[in-house]
Amino acid sequence: GGRGDRYDPATRIKVALDMLGKGMRTYEAVFGCLTGEVETMVTHNADLQQRNDTQRQVFDAVLKERVQQFDAEREELLLEISALKKGNAANEASLQSVRMLKEHVTAKEAELTNAILAANLREESDLAARRSQDQLFAQFSSRNKMLEEELEDAQKEYRGTSLRADELQQTCQRYAQRL
């Protein structure tokens, strides 16, 4: 019978094999696609790796250059620092000598001030002494004047007296001649 043919084992096996065959072809197609993609990825990966290597080389070169530059700059800075330190030491020394000079000058100023003060004091005492001498001199000269005046008076008196004595003597002589 026609209808029963479809379900006999042989037919079933044939149908199953057909389906399996279709499935296998689908798998093969998918597998083919996958294989292509994998190959593409492998190629892409190789490209990436190469690009990566190139970039790393460039980066390494740049880094090396930067490091050298940095070292050179550090050397320069170290030299500058040591120069600055030397300059600082020199400055410190000159500052010290300036400080010492200042102290010396201050000491000298103090000495001069003291000397000036002493001279002023001496001058004042000299002035005082001179004033007292002047006063003494004034006293002496006024006393001198008085003495001179007294002397003059005495001399006048003496002259007067001697004139009178002369007159008396002449008178006496005249009397003597008369006698």
Image: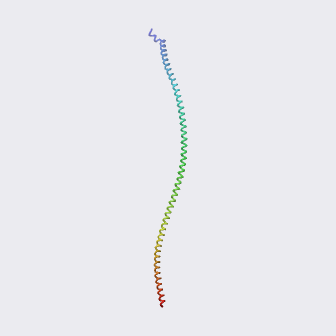
Residue placed most toward the observer, 156 or 148: 156
**Count of numbered tags:** 0
Residue placed most toward the observer, 56 or 65: 65
In the image, residue 59 above or below residue 6: below
Coordinates of residue 107 in the picture (x, y in percent): 52, 57
Q: Quadrant of the N terminus?
A: top left
In the image, residue 92 above or below residue 53: below
Q: In the image, 67: left or right of 3?
A: right
Coordinates of residue 42 in the picture (x, y in percent): 52, 25
In the image, residue 78 above or below residue 24: below
Residue placed most toward the observer, 176 or 35: 176
View extreme (bottom): residue? 179
Residue placed most toward the observer, 179 or 65: 179
View extreme (left): residue? 3
Coordinates of residue 23 in the picture (x, y in percent): 48, 17
Judging from the image, the colouring scheme is: rainbow
Coordinates of residue 39 in the picture (x, y in percent): 52, 23
